[in-house]
Image (cartoon, grey):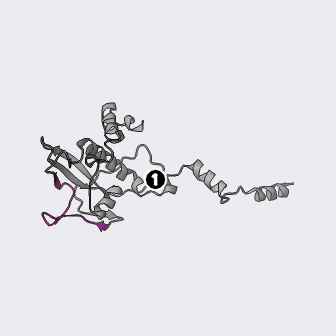
Amino acid sequence: MTLRMFWTREKVDAWKKQVSDPDRTQTCSNMMCMVNVAQKLWEKARFALKPLSISEDQKVLTVQFYWLSRHSYSRRMPAIKTPGPFPGNLSSSTVNGEHIAKLFNIATDTKLCSGDVITFETNDPIGHPLPSMELLNMQWVLHRVLALSGVADATDEDLESESDRYLRLVSSGQYQEDTDSDTEEEEEEE
């Protein structure tokens, strides 16, 4: 498993247990309800939530909010190129230097900025549990990887391997080897 190349077996096994148990995948502790704009930004890894703590009674969860910079997807990246750090002072999602989205804390009537602390609460930790700390930790890590890689905005064509692209073009008739020009060159040489 690729994750084990970067994280310990114990950590990967804990993540796997959280998402592979059929009784856990469609439960409150495995879901987050967000307003539609926030959900789209979350899906595109425009922000991440760093889990800080959960109360002993499982009624209060504290996370730290971070906007993530958008990076362009590239098939190849030199192994010696180190990606830049995520800026800690962002107050919106930007693309090509332009602000495309902001989120607001309704309780404080302020925009969410990187580093802001958000609290989730429940009165019923059994019937309406808070998100799992293990899954939030996994999301925290994987959202940052996703943002750095640029894969969140990559198209299916971007992600297609060279051999898959060749086979697709050949099977659709869009790629034909240039046999006519080879024949003409051979005739000129004779």
Q: Residue furthest front?
A: 127
Q: Residue furthest right?
A: 190
Task: Out of 7 and 31, give the one closest to the viewer.
Answer: 31
**Is 20 left or right of 91, judged from the image as shown?**
right
Residue at image mark 1: 74
Q: Where 29 sits versus 186, above or below?
A: above
Q: Residue at x 20, y 47 (%)?
A: 127
Number of residues whose C-alpha sits closer than 10 Å to that of mark 1, classed few (under 14), some (14–19) or many (20 or more):
few
Chain part drawn in magenta: 99-121
Secondary element at image label 1: loop
Percent x, y of residue 168: 61, 54
Task: Out of 177 and 124, give the one closest to the viewer.
Answer: 124
Percent x, y of residue 49: 24, 51
Residue 118 drawn in magenta: yes
Q: Residue at x 23, y 64 (%)?
A: 103
Q: Amino acid at mark 1?
A: Ser
Residue 106 drawn in magenta: yes
Percent x, y of residue 1: 42, 36
